[in-house]
Amino acid sequence: MAGLSAINPQFLYVCAGIFLFAIGLWGTWLHAHYVRKIISLNVMGAGVFLTLIAVAYRGENLPPDPVPHALVLTGIVVAVSATALALVIIRRLEDATDE
Amino acid sequence: MNEAASVVWVISLPLLGALLATVWRQRAATIGWISSALTAGCAVWLLWVVQHAGVQQLALGGWEIGLGISLYADGLAAVMVLMSSLVVLGCSVYARQYFRAQRQHELFWPLWLLLATALNALFLAGDLFNVYVTLELLGISASALTALGAKRAALRAALRYLVVGLLGSMLYLMAITLLYAAYGTLNAVQIAEALQVNPLGWAALLLMLAGLALKMALFPLHFWLPPAHSNAPAPVSAALSALVVKAAFYLVVRLWFEVFAPLTTPLLANVLGALGAMAVLWGSWSALRAERLKLLAAYSSVAQLGYLVMFFPLLMVLEGEARHWLFGAMVLFALSHAFAKSALFLAAGILMQYAGHDRIRELSGTTQALPLTTFVIALAGIALVGLPPSGAFLGKWYLLDAAFKTGQWWWVLVLVAGSLLATAYVFRLLGHAFGHLPAVKRPIVAATQEMPALALALLATFGLGLGAMSLWSWLAHTGTGAGL
């Protein structure tokens, strides 16, 4: 299969990233439970990060582009902090006794 | 001192304040209002610098553009920074009294100053990725502040607010990824120069618009706004309604008219305008039916943001001088709403502290008990309806004028219906407030709470209305950025 070997790995990674992003979007929108929404958001984030990493690839013998990698790092930090905050609020909500 | 320093100070002063307030908890309130006062002073300085020395562009730490953090201050950005700093200052003075003897006050100040930092950094970001970071900072601090309400309803609203905010940012980040893949840069000016009309650009534009529409609560994505804005503590509600949604709107303006200028079409603008029109009608109708004052104020925000989006289809078809003036009118409308809505929420907070509730039906006698607060509500109402001499009146007048000039008369119908509904909800509120109360209690309300609300309401009505001309002509001619 000559055609198959022509498929560029970078293209596959980008497709996988967009697929994860779409699944995450779907999950965030449709799941009712907030823990599931948070997990879906993280799946969405993983999709974006995968796409960014694939974008950084510049060719066989070239070093990857560092800028998208820096963006991924920043993005992960943000995602972790936001997830932590969301989980704290979910726990507070479960402990809250009023109403 | 170096002129460009003003750009840095409006971001670093509140950040410094946030750090100090975290470390030095007993003095958090003092640190809070002092640093917001200093920030407001720097914002005035920034406006002066932009007015006299032109657009300020700064690459932090000497890193070349494309790698480091670049800041960009033109007239629009400077005006937005000044607006947000003034609202933050007003709310800070108010919050000192509001949180007195409350457990949350030590938690409030660091988050509050972080919110101010994020807002100013967002208005001045010259780089699409910095915009993402500031958006996240804004969303996280805003939802943590909402959660300070501590009731179940507030926690639930904060959680939904956080999730919606994160979803919006993720859509935005994906759009950035696509743009970086295509053009190899994230600098707004460089992307604007390189942008081509192709499916990838379209995908990026639509993802960004969807994400920001979610964050600015554009109809039908407004579902999260009323619970979040009505359950937060009063100064937080004021900032959320006046500033945080306005930040997303500011980004839409920047992206639409500058970065994505070649891609935007009248068709897409009409879709946005139609959503805005529905927001005006639905938001005003819901505000009229609201049982609680804070809910009324929150729904009225949905409507007011709708008006702002209705400017888009008219701006697309106008050209030259008329377009610049209409753009100025849109900014004036946004500023006017910011001051009026923050004043209304602060007044609602005073009412809640006094009466223990904000149920509109049971507000009778407020006038006798709290004359100044009622006056603030009336002034804010004038600005929300768009009566002269408020800034909103001038904004609406130009919208009306442009709608007739371009033959798009249907927007006028929405404008009239929305204004009538707004009149109805403001008068319903005032009608209840002026109701007779047999025994007049003498309330103890600190002047430091009523005065900031009054100052903001006066800015919205008389300040912007009467002082509009110089600001407006400047905005119309030099204030707008590269694309206009």
Image: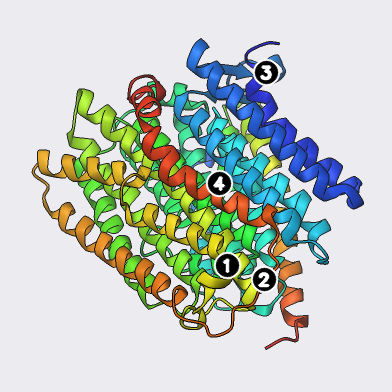
As measured in the structure, the alpha-carbon distance from the residue carrying label 2 to the one carrying label 3 is: 46 Å
- What's the amino acid at mark 3? Ala
- What's the amino acid at mark 2? Pro
Of all chains, the one bearing label 4 is B
Checking the image for residue B370, the label placed there is 1
Mark 1 vs 3, N-terminal side: 3
Task: Between residue B332 and residue B179, name the one nearer to us.
Answer: B332
Q: Where is residue B325 in the image (x, y as percent from the top left)?
A: 27, 30
Q: Which of marks 4 and 1 is in front?
A: 1
- The residue tagged 3 is B5
- What's the amino acid at mark 1? Leu
Residue for point 47% across, 65% down: B298
Of all chains, the one bearing label 2 is B
Q: Colour scheme used in the picture?
A: rainbow
Q: In this view, does B95 lie above or below B155?
A: above
Mark 3, secondary structure of its residue: helix
As measured in the structure, the alpha-carbon distance from the residue carrying label 3 to the one carrying label 4 is: 29 Å
Are the residues flagged by discs 2 and 1 in contact, CB closer than 8 Å? yes
- What's the amino acid at mark 4? Ala
Task: Give the quadrant of the N terminus of chain B.
Answer: top right
Checking the image for residue B455, the label placed there is 4
As measured in the structure, the alpha-carbon distance from the residue carrying label 4 to the one carrying label 1 is: 16 Å
Q: Please, which residue is most extreme toward the left here?
A: B407
Tags 4 and 1 both on a single chain: yes
Q: Position of residue B206 (x, y in %)?
A: 37, 47
Are the residues flagged by discs 4 and 2 in contact, CB closer than 8 Å? no
Mark 4 vs 2, N-terminal side: 2
Of all chains, the one bearing label 3 is B
